Image (tube, rainbow, N blue to C red):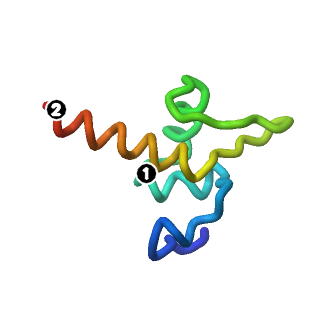
Amino acid sequence: MKPRPSSYEALPWVLTPEEVAPLLNVGMCTVYELLRSNQLKHARIGVQYRILKQDVLAFMDQGSQAAKAV
């Protein structure tokens, strides 16, 4: 497993599910469930998933806004 980047600017533009899991602090099953349910935007290339950094950040921001509303 790769170490966590020290900042979001250090992230590559395109991420794999394996790279997204530690960013969201969830397991791989949860990442795949988010992808299958289209809660996390992604592109599917053959059998591989790719997620844009901006979509991960938007998903994280969406979650923090929902937490503030509660």
Count neighbours of disc 1 (C-alpha within 10 A) and say few if under 14, some if 14 to 19, many if 20 or more. Answer: some
Q: Position of residue 36 (x, y in %)?
A: 60, 26
Q: Nearer the viewer, residue 29 or 69?
A: 69
Q: Secondary structure at mark 2?
A: helix
Q: Earlier in the sequence, mark 2 or mark 1?
A: 1
Q: Nearer the viewer, residue 51 or 22?
A: 51
Q: Seen from this angle, which residue lies furthest top?
A: 37
17 shown above or below 68: below
Say which residue label 1 marks. Answer: 24
Q: Seen from this angle, which residue lies furthest left?
A: 70
The residue under label 2 is which amino acid type? Ala
Q: Position of residue 27 (x, y in %)?
A: 48, 48
Q: Position of residue 2 (x, y in %)?
A: 60, 71
Q: Position of residue 37 (x, y in %)?
A: 55, 23
Q: Secondary structure at mark 1?
A: helix
What number is the disc on residue 15? none
Say which residue label 2 marks. Answer: 69
Whether residue 63 sits left or right of residue 3 in the image: it is left
Whether residue 52 sits left or right of residue 7 in the image: it is right
The residue under label 1 is which amino acid type? Leu
Dividing the picture into quarters, in which one does residue 6 lie? bottom left
Q: Quadrant of the C terminus?
A: top left
Dividing the picture into quarters, in which one does residue 11 lie? bottom right
Which residue is located at x 26 percent, y 38 percent?
65
